[in-house]
Amino acid sequence: MEIVERSAGDITILDVTGRMTLGEGDEALRDKVNSLVSQGKKKLILNLAAVAYIDSAGLGEIVRTYTTVSRQGGSLKLLGLTKRITDLLSITKLLTVFETYDDEADAVRSFSTAARA
């Protein structure tokens, strides 16, 4: 699994590519997010459009990431969910926990709308 970090203003977008599985991506994501949060970056978008497969460890890591960021007063949003990932989140009832977006501009904009609400 590969993670590319980029920014849109004060929002950090993590483009994830590959398989998010036990030992193959779960630790990489955890380390990346912990590093960002410790730098004070708390507005995160996880772009999963290029993730081919997620197992239970990968799913657990997304939940852990969400919890880590939320506890620090931040926000994590998911972008570009494939049908397989959407189905997985739906089956596990996690689709109701995460804010999900198909369009990156909408995801970025959602942070400023949340700030005004």
Image (spheres, rainbow, N blue to C red):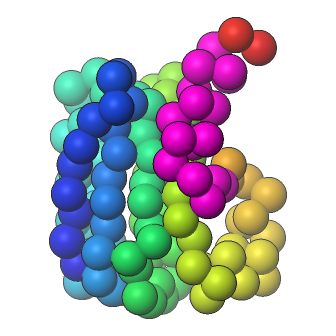
Q: Give whichever of 107, 71 is nearer the camera.
A: 107
Q: Is residue 55 above or below residue 9?
A: below
Q: Give whichever of 56, 107 is nearer the camera.
A: 107
Quadrant assignment for the N terminus: bottom left
Magenta-drawn stretch contains 104: yes
Q: Is residue 28 left or right of residue 65?
A: left
Q: Is residue 55 left or right of residue 7?
A: right
Can residue 40 be seen here? The reply is: yes
Where, by quadrant of the figure, is residue 48 drawn? Answer: bottom left
Q: Position of residue 31 (x, y in %)?
A: 21, 54
Q: Is residue 8 left or right of residue 6?
A: right
Where, by quadrant of the figure, is residue 38 drawn? Answer: top left
Quadrant assignment for the C terminus: top right
Can residue 69 be seen here? The reply is: no
Q: Give whichever of 54, 71 is nearer the camera.
A: 54
Residue drawn 51% across and 74% down? 59
Residues drawn in magenta: 100-115
Magenta-drawn stretch contains 61: no
Which secondary structure type mostly characterizes the magenta part of the structure? helix
Q: Position of residue 85 (x, y in %)?
A: 59, 80
Residue drawn 63% across and 32% down? 110
Q: Is residue 86 above or below residue 94?
A: below
Q: Give whichever of 98, 67 is nearer the camera.
A: 98
Residue drawn 61% across and 41% down? 106
Q: Position of residue 108 (x, y in %)?
A: 51, 35
Residue drawn 74% across and 64% down? 95
